[in-house]
Image (spheres, rainbow, N blue to C red):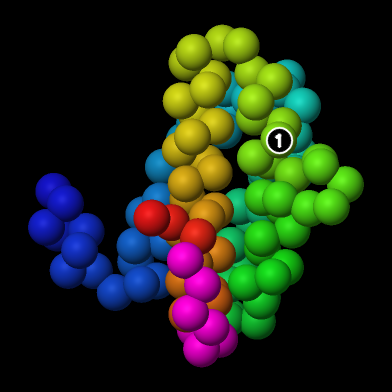
Amino acid sequence: MIEKINEMNADLQVAFLLTLSEKVICMLSNSSGYKDAVEAIDLCWSWVENKNISGDTIYQFLDNADETGLFILMQFEENELKMKAWNCIIDAIAFADWKAYIEQGKNIYLLQ
């Protein structure tokens, strides 16, 4: 399975991860940050379709100076299954963000 994912182009890889995220996001409908997560996923889809969203814009949903980013909000989750959903969603957004930075010609390492 991983080999097939690695063979996909960047858009398909991002789309695959965003689709997984959309399957699990309903688990977080009562969680703080749910609306931001939905908005971030929508923004990532827009990037896939149009390449009109900057990496910096996507990153603001993950982390920001107000400490209201998804990285912070997910830390308040106590339910283990919901935490797995958060990890799926944040990984998808971070991956899309990384690809957006690459598309912009910026060599940013968000995922290591």
Query: Seen in the image, is 55 located left or right of residue 108?
Result: right
> How many discs appear?
1
Q: Residue at x 88, y 47 (%)?
A: 66
Q: Residue at x 46, y 25 (%)?
A: 84
Q: Dot 1 corresponds to which residue? A: 72
Q: Residue flagged by tag 1: what amino acid is it?
A: Ile
In the picture, which quadrant includes the C terminus?
bottom left
Q: Position of residue 101 (x, y in %)?
A: 54, 76
Q: Is residue 44 above or below residue 80?
A: below
Q: Is residue 30 above or below residue 6?
A: above
Query: Which one is nearer the viewer's eye here, 66 or 1?
Result: 66
Q: Position of residue 36 (x, y in %)?
A: 75, 44
Magenta stretch in the rendered image: 103-109
Query: Seen in the image, is 102 located left or right of residue 25?
Result: left
Tell me if mark 1 has few (under 14), some (14-19) or many (20+) residues whose alpha carbon lies within 10 angstroms of its own.
some
Q: Position of residue 85 (x, y in %)?
A: 50, 29
- State the image quarter where residue 69 is shown: top right
- Any part of residue 78 in sight: yes
As for residue 36 lying within the magenta part, the answer is no
As for residue 106 lying within the magenta part, the answer is yes
Q: Residue at x 50, y 60 (%)?
A: 110
